[in-house]
Image (spheres, helix red, strand yellow):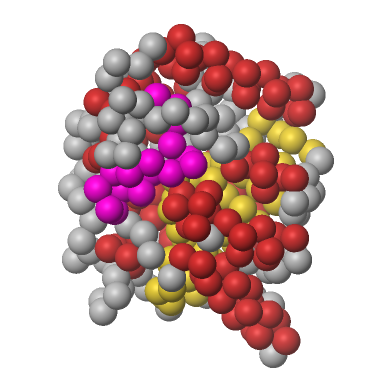
Amino acid sequence: MFTLTEFPKFKEEMVDGGHSACPGCGSTTALRMVMAALGKQAVVFVPASCGSLYFGIEHSTVAIPVVNTVYASAFCQAAGYSYALRMNGDCTTQVVVWGGDGAFYDIGMDGLSHIASQNFDVIAICNDNEGYQNTGGHSSSGTPKGTQTRLSPEGHKAQAKNLMEIMAAHRIPYAASITAAFPDDLRRKISKAKTIPGMKFLHLLTSCVQWQHAADAGIQLVRKAVACNAHPLYEVFNGEEYVINYLPPKREPVENYLSMQGRFKGLDPREFQAEVDRRWAELWLRARGTVRPA
């Protein structure tokens, strides 16, 4: 059983039991870390997603206020709430959006782009499990090419959007990638986001049982994603300064990551590897080889 006492830098448990997430859900472990790092002076806006199951509609499992919203309005509602707080002199309450890739990559992306371009004081956390998993495992524009889903049983045809680069192009003050497999990195980035005025974006990769993996392999999977550079850990400041936060001592081949999941059956790993290598090369150039912890 995972407990936050294993990670003493997380001060207290902020998530209770009783949620309706699937056994083996990777999001709930990450949620506990994120909520502990945020602390109690925060409010979370949750667009329709898997998050509705563990934040809850009638009963919330987190120790802070939660506003359940529809996809299209989540970001603008959060921005309006933040603006009202700041106008009334409250500059410490953190306003957070926790949504899936459906909200961030697709249905709510216009609202996300709007609050980013206007630099509202919001922390936007994309809980990215690479598909519309709550509806049975459908593809989104964050689904990797070649993934088998209900909409693409022969393999998703398009490359996933690079959401970090889209957000960096808005030149927001802070964007960073995180996973629950690197808890100290996650905690430091959440803590940093709390101190930076304006828009902050955090790209959180979480595993999903729809990926067809062993129920106890969620953390190992996202660690593998970092180890093969499928989900590199890095930060972007003001859309200009790139910093890589973790350099795998020995980069693993993507096949080690893909082979643990049934959703990639029949995929030629060489094509996946080529896309990972291309994106890593671009990131390395943007960062000018700068590597340091968050």
Residue 134: give x, y in percent of width and height.
29, 53
**Is residue 64 at all visible to an observer of this figure?**
no
Residue lying at the far bottom in this picture: please name it. 88
In the displayed structure, would residue 137 be above or below residue 173?
A: above
- Residue 61 occupies which quadrant of the picture? bottom left
**Is residue 27 at all visible to an observer of this figure?**
yes
Residue 89 shown left or right of residue 64 in the figure: right
Residue 1 shown left or right of residue 62 in the figure: left
**Quadrant that contains the C terminus:** top right
Residue 42: give x, y in percent of width and height.
52, 73
**Residue appearing at x 33%, y 44% in the figure:** 138
In the displayed structure, would residue 285 be above or below residue 198?
A: above
Residue 3 shown left or right of residue 7 in the figure: left
Residue 71: give x, y in percent of width and height.
46, 65
Dominant SS type (magenta)? loop
Count the numbered circles shown.
Answer: 0
Looking at the rendering, the stretch of residues picked out in magenta corresponds to 131-146
**Residue appearing at x 58%, y 56% in the figure:** 109
**Residue appearing at x 61%, y 64% in the figure:** 111
Residue 280: give x, y in percent of width and height.
62, 22
In the displayed structure, would residue 216 be above or below residue 100?
A: above
- Residue 210 occupies which quadrant of the picture? top left
**Residue appearing at x 67%, y 44% in the figure:** 166
Q: Is residue 254 magenta?
A: no
Q: Nearer the viewer, residue 36 or 104?
A: 104
Q: Nearer the viewer, residue 136 or 278?
A: 136
- Residue 62 occupies which quadrant of the picture? bottom left
